[in-house]
Image (cartoon, rainbow, N blue to C red):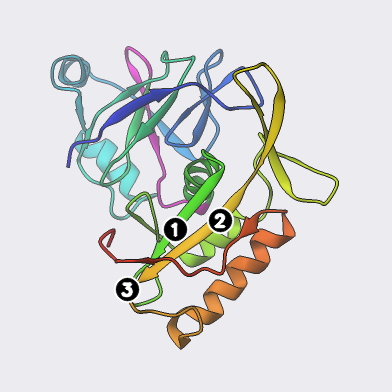
């Protein structure tokens, strides 16, 4: 499925950083802050990007990328310009993707790197004050319709989001302003929807839910009993 781009205001603590699917990029230097490979483009590749918004690797480039990403495709869709500097770019995609650093230079991201996945998932998890995950009947977690490996999920909860701070009770809160101009605070919370009829004490769910609850508690995120009837339609 073709990626859908959604531009929203940056929540980064550093004004110099923008994000592409949670991937930090310094928009002043063009430096991509996660594992990647920079490739120089041929005239044909430049024309392909400008006319089709796709990018096809030349044979030598493909060999180079496959050495780092065994499943690297020959063709990428939806090239993201780093010049979109004052926004976040949420990108739904089926595989690795590329960022245009200039007219003739491309950064191909190493999507199989765990750090990339963690940063992407952290952005999705902590974008709003309420984080809702789903589990399927096999005990796998989904966020925004995307399967999240369990260890990646735990790594994402290893530290609190930059936008939140702890209150006197050690809970994470985010400041909000009312229509009257008064500041108030909202707790960050986490819930997990299980398949219809499932219970958090079922063997397939219990161990993982307890681990996730512990990780959330350590950084000050409130959580429910992890029971919210739903379905596994995100699978």
Residue indicated by mark 3 = 196
* Nearer to us in this view, 175 or 146: 175
In the displayed structure image, the side of residue 234 where residue 123 appears, left or right:
right
- Dot 1 or dot 2, earlier in sequence: 1
CB atoms of marks 1 and 2 within 8 Å: yes
- Where residue 215 sits in the image (x, y, percent)? 66, 63
- Image: magenta residue range: 101-114
Which label belongs to residue 190?
Answer: 2
Residue lying at 25% horizontally and 37% vertically, measured from the top left:
60
In the displayed structure image, the side of residue 137 where residue 36 appears, left or right:
right
Estimate how packed mark 2 is, as few (under 14), some (14 to 19) or many (20 or more) residues with alpha carbons within 10 Å: many
Q: CA distance from mark 1 to mark 3?
A: 14 Å
Residue indicated by mark 1 = 133
Looking at the rendering, in which quadrant would you find the C terminus? Answer: bottom left
Q: In this picture, is 68 found above or below 54?
A: below
In the displayed structure image, the side of residue 109 where residue 44 appears, left or right:
left
- Where residue 161 sits in the image (x, y, percent)? 65, 41
Q: Look at the numbered disc 3 and give the secondary structure of its residue.
A: loop
- Where residue 51 sits in the image (x, y, percent)? 14, 15
Q: Nearer the viewer, mark 1 or mark 3?
A: 3
Q: Residue furthest bottom?
A: 203
Residue lying at 59% horizontally and 19% vertically, measured from the top left:
179
In the displayed structure image, the side of residue 208 where residue 110 appears, left or right:
left
Residue 98, quarter of picture: top left
């Amino acid at each position: 499925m073709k990626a859908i781009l959604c531009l929203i205001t940056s929540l980064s603590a550093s004004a110099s950083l923008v994000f592409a699917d949670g991937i930090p990029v310094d928009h002043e230097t063009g430096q991509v802050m996660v594992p990647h490979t920079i490739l120089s483009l041929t005239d044909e590749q430049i024309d392909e990007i400008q006319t089709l918004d796709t990018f096809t690797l030349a044979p030598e480039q493909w060999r180079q990328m496959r050495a780092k990403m065994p499943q690297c495709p020959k063709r990428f869709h939806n090239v993201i310009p780093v010049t979109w500097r004052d926004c976040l770019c949420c990108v739904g995609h089926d595989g690795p993707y590329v960022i245009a650093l200039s007219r003739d230079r491309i950064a191909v991201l190493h999507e199989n790197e765990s750090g990339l996945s963690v940063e992407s998932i952290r952005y999705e998890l902590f974008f709003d004050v309420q984080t809702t995950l789903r589990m399927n009947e096999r005990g796998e977690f989904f966020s925004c319709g995307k399967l999240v490996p369990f260890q990646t999920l735990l790594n994402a909860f290893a530290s609190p989001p930059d936008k939140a701070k702890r209150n006197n009770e050690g809970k994470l809160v985010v400041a909000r302003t009312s229509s009257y101009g008064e500041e108030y605070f909202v707790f960050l919370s986490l819930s997990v929807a299980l398949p219809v009829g499932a219970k958090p004490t079922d063997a397939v769910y219990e161990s993982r839910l307890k681990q996730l609850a512990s990780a959330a508690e350590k950084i000050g995120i409130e959580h429910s009993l992890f029971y919210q009837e739903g379905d596994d339609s995100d699978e």
